[in-house]
Amino acid sequence: MSIIAVVGNKGGTGKTTLALNLAAGLAARGDAVVIVDADPQQSAYQWRLAGDADNGLPHVVAAALGLPKTVQALRDAHEHVVIDCPPSIKAPQAEAALRLANYALVPVQPSPMDLWATTHIAKVIERLRAENPGLRALIVMSQLEPRTTLSKLMPEAAMEMDLPVAAVGIRRRSIHRHCVLEGRSVFQAGKRGLEAAAEIDQLLTELLNHG
Ligand SMILES: Nc1ncnc2c1ncn2[C@@H]1O[C@H](COP(=O)(O)OP(=O)(O)OP(=O)(O)O)[C@@H](O)[C@H]1O
Ligand SMILES: [Mg+2]
């Protein structure tokens, strides 16, 4: 049983996109997985509504209120619960998710300022480890454009961070935006989604197969 919380302190970094596709990647591996949308904006919930009910995208439960009870009710029937959090680490939903989670993923866009803004998240995670000692946190580089200077500089900037950075980064690809329109994940986008799906699957391997 794993609980994966996708958190952040900035809007639009790719939290919902990562949460949904990670869950879809786990489902593609044959695992029972559910997404809990803890963001009052309900982006993940609406994304799911945009797709056919039987399109294979994991079920999304909206739970901006009563997160612990919702997760408790879901944990027995699922191998993984992926929680999509609002864009503030101070939001009560983010803190509640981090109390429950085994893994916290922090998507960060390739900008040094965005990376520095994770310092506050690292502090919150450190504080919550007193109650949740097993919590493992990883920064995930999001919307990377490998040819740009900034994206090339990011690994160096990331070395100075208080949180470890995942070896696998998520590239900016138009298929991610198309998939939102179609209410699906990159795992259900056929050939067009193959590269994006492979990246998500590598991240899952890195996350779940740590020593
Ligand atoms: N890897 C990617 N490649 C291309 N577009 C992306 C990628 N990840 C996210 N996006 C796009 O960036 C925008 C913001 O993504 P998303 O909604 O996942 O971010 P968020 O962090 O959940 O935002 P919020 O803070 O509002 O909850 C969306 O239009 C999404 O389609
Ligand atoms: Mg979101």
Image (tube, rainbow, N blue to C red):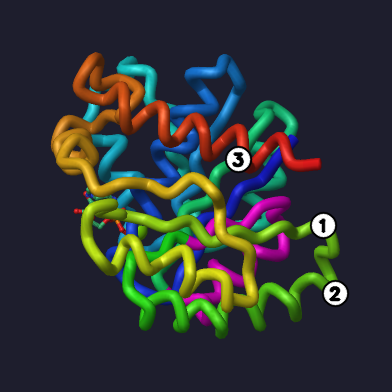
Which residue is denoted by mark 1 in the rendering? 134
Which quarter of the figure is the N terminus placed in? top right
Residue 130 percent across, percent down from the top left: 85, 74
Residue 80 percent across, percent down from the top left: 64, 35
Q: Residues within 10 Å of mark 1 (few under 14, many from 20)?
A: few
Residue at mark 1 to residue at mark 2: CA–CA distance: 10 Å
Which region is colored magenta? 88-106
- Residue at the spot 51% in from the left edge and 22% down from the top edge: 27
Q: Quadrant of ligand 1?
A: bottom left
- Residue at the spot 82% in from the left edge and 57% down from the top edge: 134
Task: Give the structural element (helix, strand or loop) at label 1.
Answer: loop
Disc 2 residue type (three-letter)? Ala
Residue at mark 2 to residue at mark 3: CA–CA distance: 22 Å
Disc 1 residue type (three-letter)? Gly
Residue 200 percent across, percent down from the top left: 44, 35
- Residue at the spot 51% in from the left edge and 70% down from the top edge: 158
Q: Nearer the viewer, mark 3 or mark 1?
A: 1
Which residue is denoted by mark 2 in the rendering? 130
Which residue is denoted by mark 3 in the rendering? 81
Q: Nearer the viewer, residue 154 or 135?
A: 154
Task: Give the structural element (helix, strand or loop) at label 3.
Answer: strand
